[in-house]
Amino acid sequence: MLAHSFMSDEKKQNSPRPLILAVEDHDDNLVLMSYALESLGCRFICQKDSTNTVLVAKEYQPDLILLDILLPTISGIDVVRYLQQDALTCNIPVVAVTALASREDKERILKAGFNAYLSKPYMIEELETVIRRLLCGKIDSTSGFELCKE
């Protein structure tokens, strides 16, 4: 099965804008993520299938990965384990974005090696907060959401 990937405008250029890899199999959730990332001024790669996630991460070296857990081919937990085993990807922060919302699920997911956890449905502001925290100043301090509220 071929993995479908989409990359925002500035492909692999030396841009100061952070690059985020978003792996999500539901179109609506992917659109919401891409809207949020665009409003934050991030470049992004979107994938609907986790089959090539590790290869894409090795090639593009994203600043952050947003990873669904319940994916059709390889689970997000398995993907994060593969990422941690590779020297090229082991230091990329990974956020679990999942419908698994129990306290036990959250503990299991964070113990598997994720840097942060977001339960679906989430508010865009929650996504922004997690991204800003993990990217440590790589995003302009003005929120795209704050600009829209004016």
Image (spheres, rainbow, N blue to C red):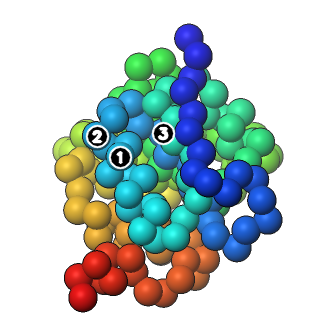
Q: Amino acid under label 1? A: Val
Q: Is residue 83 left or right of residue 1?
A: right
Residue 134 in view (yes/no): no
Q: Which mark is residue 108?
A: none
Q: Badge 2: few (under 14), some or many (20 or more) residues near its Cα, within 10 Å? A: few
- Dividing the picture into quarters, in which one does residue 43 lie? bottom right
Considering depth in this image, is 56 or 149 the residue closer to the camera? Answer: 149
Q: Amino acid under label 3? A: Val
Report if the CB atoms under discs 3 and 1 are less than 8 Å apart. Answer: no
* Above or below: residue 125 compared with residue 87: below
**What residue did someone put label 2 on?**
28
**What residue did someone put label 3 on?**
23
* Above or below: residue 15 compared with residue 4: below
**What residue did someone put label 1 on?**
31
Report if the CB atoms under discs 2 and 1 are less than 8 Å apart. Answer: yes
Q: CA distance from mark 3 to mark 1?
A: 11 Å
